Amino acid sequence: MFWQACTICGHAPYPGRPPDRLPSMSEHDPELDQHFPEITRRLRAFGSAPVASVVADRTLARLRAAGRPRLSGTRLKLLSAAAIAGFAAGGVGLAAADVLPAPVQDVAHNALDAVGVHVPPGHNRYNDPTVCPGGPYRNHGAYVRAHPNDPNAGASPCGKPVQSVNPTGKPNADKNDPTDKNDPADKNDKNKAHGPPPWAHGHGKPDTQDPATGPDPTTKPAKPSPASTAPMTTTSRPPSTTTSSSSTSSTTSTTTRP
Amino acid sequence: MNLAPAMTNETVTPDPPSAPAAPGRGIEDVFRRYAAAVHNYLRAAGATDSEDLLSDVFIDVMRGLERFRGDEDALRRWVFTIAHHRLVDEHRRRARRRKLARAQTQMRVVPPDEAIDPALVSALDALTPDQREVVVLRFVADLSLETVAEMTNRPEGAVKSLQHRALRNLAFNLDPAGF
């Protein structure tokens, strides 16, 4: 019972019977809508207007394009498996033919070696039997591990790629050897040949002259004097004062003087 | 009392779960039956690109048509439910874009060259979004009260109330002197 008397005084909280439920705002007679027959008629007319044939044709064309059969899940899985198998077989074939780049070939060599497929390594390792007894070694680490009591094992070229080992058996040891490709002096020569970038126009790093050939008479003095560099920065300023512009013109003529 | 058939037929029976789809019900058949109603519903509800949205709706219908089970009324309800969801998505997307761009562009309801009853469109523009949603689903899409309540997640009483206020406001906006 929802309406109960007070447990202390025994009186009902409200006199008489409880009032009927108040009508809520959401309740109204649906037939009230017939008071707006014109509105509902116009709304229904709006809804039943035919669609333009151009719109219908375009939409149907899109529907037909979207309704083309797509790959089912099973076919997609089969195709994915075939693609993966093809890539794997192609990769193994390329590795076996030794046409992969050296680092990739090395990775393929190590990975396939673990599953019993032997493909050539990416680098020819230095394994001279006179220098590296007990070889051949797979890499330099294998040589070092095989000689735990040799304090010079780490410095040995054994197991290193032959590209990093010169004919004497020492990696990058002879820097005076003109045939050594890894000579840093060669790199310096190459760098010297480049010179400053074309956009530097003498403002870049100073050109170091070769002491053997002497100064090149055709080249301008690369490093400007401090007196000429300071006003060159003032030329970019707007000519706000007369003093600065006059000093600029005088110093500019100084720099262009041979 | 001269009510339209859709207003008198307020009872929506639940779809029998094992009822098969009607024979010969292809996407083009469904499209020809409901394209105009869905297109007009989208336009009246304020879709920016109603044609694009119409394509999206029927692409969804096409993808789900094989699994659909139900009679003709259920098909109509289902198609308009998809259209309603697409429209809500579009409104949300547009609101996000407007928030990002901070461009208060006026919502374009019907292209000017295709205006059908422009006075009614202007009066629909003046309604609140809730009133517009209900009145368009109810009379332009011609759906029952229960279906509209289900689609909009409102009690039937709230739908009735919104519908009544929307009609009253439409009447006032269309003919202020005669109201």
Image (tube, coloured by chain):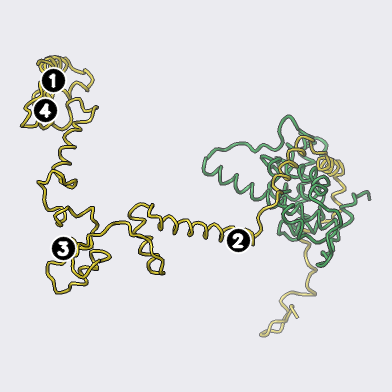
Chain colours: A yellow, B green
The residue under label 3 is A156
The residue under label 2 is A78
The residue under label 1 is A218
- Distance from the alpha carbon under mark 3 to that under mark 2: 51 Å
Q: Residues within 10 Å of mark 2 (few under 14, many from 20)?
A: few
Q: Secondary structure at mark 3?
A: loop
Q: Is residue A248 above or below residue B150?
A: above
Q: Toward which corner of the image does residue A239 lie, by quadrant?
A: top left
Pinpoint the chain carrying mark 2. Answer: A
**Tags 3 and 1 touching, CB below 8 Å:** no
The residue under label 4 is A223
Sequence-first tag of 3 and 4: 3
- Mark 3 vs mark 4: in front: 3
Residue B49 placement (x, y as % from top left): 67, 39
Residue extending furthest toward the right: B1
Q: Residues within 10 Å of mark 3 (few under 14, many from 20)?
A: some
- Mark 3 vs mark 2: in front: 3
Quadrant where the N terminus of chain A sits is: bottom right
Sequence-first tag of 4 and 2: 2
User: Is A186 on the left-hand or right-hand side of A86?
Assistant: left
Kind of residue sitting beneath label 3: Ser
Q: Is residue A48 above or below residue A149?
A: above
Q: Secondary structure at mark 1?
A: loop
Kind of residue sitting beneath label 2: Leu
**Tags 3 and 2 touching, CB below 8 Å:** no
Picture residue at 75% right of the left edge, 32% below the top? B114
Out of A215 and A112, give the one closest to the viewer: A112
Q: Residues within 10 Å of mark 4 (few under 14, many from 20)?
A: few
Kind of residue sitting beneath label 1: Thr
Quadrant where the C terminus of chain A sits is: top left
Pinpoint the chain carrying mark 4. Answer: A
